[in-house]
Amino acid sequence: MLRSFRLLGALVLTIALAGALSACGSSSKSSSSGTATVTNLMGTAPDFLDPGLGYTTQAAEADWISYTGLLTYAHANGEAGTKLIPGVAQSLPTISPDGKTYTFTLRKGLLYSNGVAVKAGDFAYSLERSIKLNWGGKSFFTENIVGAEAFDKGTAKTISGIKTDELTEQITVSLTAPYGAFANVLAFPSAALVPTGTAMSNLSNKPPPGVGPYEITNVVPNQSFSVVKNPNWAKDEIPGIPAGHVNINAKIDTNTQSEAQQVLNNSADVFDWADTLPASLLASIESQASERYAKEPTVSVFYFFLNTKIKPFNNQQVREAVAYALDRRALSRLDSGFMTPACFFLPVGMIGHPKGSCPYGDPSAAPNLTKAKQLIQASGLAGTSVTVWGETRQPRREYVDYFASVLNAIGLKATEKIIADATYFPTIGNVKLNPQAGFADWNQDFPDPSDFYLLVNAKSIQPTNNQNFSQVEDPHIQSELAVLNKVPSTNLQSVAKRWEELDEYVAKKGYVSVYGYEDVPKFFSTRLNFGAAIFHPVYGNDWTSWQLK
């Protein structure tokens, strides 16, 4: 998922279609009154707190426990957390033999956080709403669900491939072709249910009602928000979804030094795992290992996007020059050593990660600036102006400073455009702006390489909230995705070699300039029970697991 969703290890999704689970909502509801509050620091504000728009770690951590879809993930560490479980559906889907029809039945007795009853028809409305709002991953819907593209284009009033029956509470979703990861798509918070009639506009400042153990309240844009226990949620409302222990006060602190110091001093409780610990405090924090600090591996990729539609990065030689010129060791140092130098788009731990050598030099060795300069001269584009986009927070600002200096060193003319963290990704996702180059990262939101390939899929380019920042439109990629995307997540090993070959092809084309894969910090105050806290393979810190000692 965009920029801040991460996954642990080489994970394989297993969906058991037998043994349907069901539960009726209890009338005994919990209350948030008298519940302890934990202070959670975030280095950047969520892009959107509206589930129909949110697509960053900071959005997903809050949305996941406030907006439950037909399916969701088990609340567990490691590989166990990648298991899909029924959410508002009674059981995992019945899938037709041709892989194109998914059938669900809604649980009985569910209520939204405002007390309104949940209806099957809300599912269709919720997906239509996410499409109309231009959620960054809407192509997962429009590419796969019958009639979703027509709805997106305005030639249909509804999504014809979604049928609901409010007498039986049955939901049927028809696909244009089999898509192996479609069950994972239905677990996105952006596929979660909100009440029919919810405004088709950005409600991040006052998020809509949802189904989940928590609800989002008291939003102060770019400063803070609260995630409190939902009074209309019974303890055992949905098996596998815990009711939680504490309320959360999320505060935005863009200074990582201040953020880390507050948690170290116990004046705040949780450090944003998507942030980088400052080198000056690292030794003190590492001394807390096992009691309040751990380094967590992720499946993630950090890269600079290169707009392939305009000069100079529409030129293959220029893109190769960038790949030769980057000193990935220097970028790792800026990340306090949490980053492993790399060149391939699919990271270690993901099926399809290439095992061979990088095409433009060992990422752990010194860069080849001489070769890079030669390529720039040969391209005829020396002296071309480049605007490099970046965020204000550390070390992302420093990544961009370094990248701009490299572009200048090899013969281009780079200047920086640094904008506020909270608006960065929505801004560079505006296709009309046509940004040339800049910082990006991607952290997996389901265990299938097709998730990463959203970022170079021509069909995912959209006017706003675009995630294909390099605007890649490559016929070979499209022809491969047409085949590979159909393979069920349970059978990915059968096409692992083909994914590897595709990723080697993308590395050679230089559409994105990858520089590393990252570990992240799990770092808490002494107030919290560190051992009980889950670091989820998809959503990072699982707020439902936080509890006081």
Image (cartoon, helix red, strand yellow):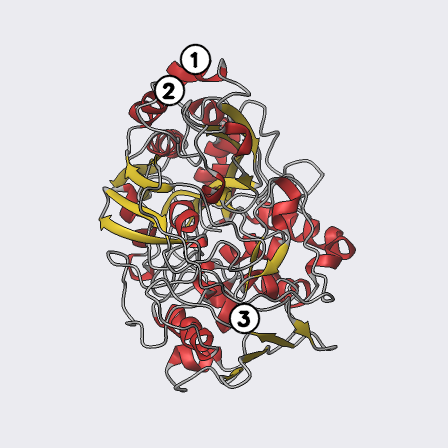
Residue 394 seen in the current view: yes
- Look at discs 3 and 1 and give the one toward the viewer: 3
Q: Position of residue 30 (x, y in %)?
A: 40, 53
- Separation of residues labelled 2 and 1 (CA atoms): 8 Å
Q: Which residue is mark 3?
A: 107
User: Tag 3, which secondary structure?
Assistant: loop
Residue 135 in the image: above or below residue 345? below
Which kind of residue does numbered mark 1 sit on?
Ser
Residue 462 sits in quarter: bottom left
**Residue at the image point whose x is 35% and y is 32% from the top:** 408
Q: Is residue 470 left or right of residue 18?
A: left
Q: Residues within 10 Å of mark 2 (few under 14, many from 20)?
A: many
Counting labels gives: 3
Sequence-first disc among 2 and 1: 2
Q: Which residue is mark 2?
A: 264
Q: Residues within 10 Å of mark 1 (few under 14, many from 20)?
A: few
Q: Position of residue 343 (x, y in %)?
A: 57, 37
**Residue at the image point whose x is 34% and y is 30% from the top:** 394
Which kind of residue does numbered mark 3 sit on?
Arg
Q: Which residue is more in the foreground, 537 or 147?
A: 537
Q: Position of residue 76 (x, y in %)?
A: 59, 43
Which kind of residue does numbered mark 2 sit on?
Leu
Sequence-first disc among 3 and 2: 3
Q: Which residue is more in the foreground, 341 or 57?
A: 57
Q: Which residue is mark 1?
A: 284
- Look at discs 2 and 1 and give the one toward the viewer: 2
